[in-house]
Amino acid sequence: MNEFMRAAIEEAEQGIAQGHGGPFGAVVVKDGKIIGRGHNRVVANNDPTCHGEISAIRDACSKLNSFDLSGADIYTTGEPCPMCLGAILWANVNKIYFGCTIAENDMIGFRDDVFYKQLSISTEKMKDRIVQIDHNECLALFKKYAAIKNKTMY
């Protein structure tokens, strides 16, 4: 068994034993070393965003004092949901290694597949849930930000 996947499984087992949430653990690895660890803490934190991958990314970024994980890989017990996949991509993680598939997540009661299907629908078809308001005020804010020199674009 891959040593990093073993560490991700151990994270998941720890979370399950503590009643933190589902069987999802992850580690972020850079230069052959684990730089971030996390497991699902949705139940423990009453936070639907606190998935294993997100927790591991937060831990790694905190340790590196950086929001950029370029050159790092992530090992996770389950194929990332859309939210986690987005976070992994935003963090510039190089490669994703996963154990169980989205279909297997569904098999144990998680609904990741539903969210992937919803995301494949254009926002135009979701007008009952996604409503644009106060466009001019928000656009003014964006323009104000765009005028700032020497800002980090991320």
Image (cartoon, rainbow, N blue to C red):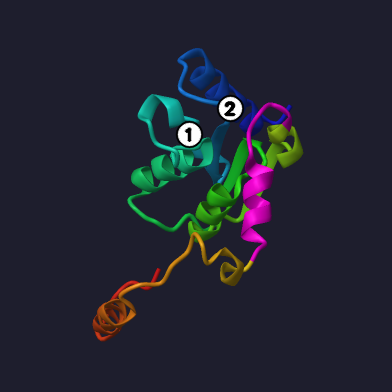
Separation (CA) of disc 1 from disc 2? 8 Å
Q: Please tell me whether the stretch drawn in magenta is mainly helix, strand or loop.
A: helix
Check disc 2: other Cα within 10 Å, few if <14, some if 14-19, many if 20+. many
Range of residues picked out in magenta: 107-121
Q: First in sequence: mark 1 or mark 2?
A: 2
Task: Give the quarter of the image for residue 126.
Answer: bottom right
Checking the image for residue 7, the label placed there is 2
- The residue shown at (62%, 49%) is 115
Residue 117: x, y in percent? 68, 54
In this orientation, which residue lies closer to the viewer: 38 or 71? Answer: 38
Residue 141 sits above or below residue 123 on the image: below
Checking the image for residue 37, the label placed there is 1
Looking at the rendered structure, the secondary structure element under dot 1 is strand
Looking at the rendered structure, the secondary structure element under dot 2 is helix
**Would residue 50 be counted in the magenta stretch?**
no
Work out whether residue 72 can be spotted: no
Q: Amino acid at mark 1?
A: Arg
- The residue shown at (66%, 52%) is 116
- The residue shown at (66%, 29%) is 109
Task: Give the quarter of the image for residue 8.
Answer: top right
Residue 70: x, y in percent? 51, 58
Residue 151: x, y in percent? 29, 75
Tell me: 135 left or right of 42: left
- The image quadrant where one finds the C terminus is bottom left
Task: Give the quarter of the image for residue 152.
Answer: bottom left
Residue 118: x, y in percent? 63, 55
Question: Is the Cβ of the residue at disc 1 closer than 8 Å to that at disc 2?
Answer: yes
Residue 20 sits above or below residue 139 on the image: above
Residue 65 sits above or below residue 55 on the image: below
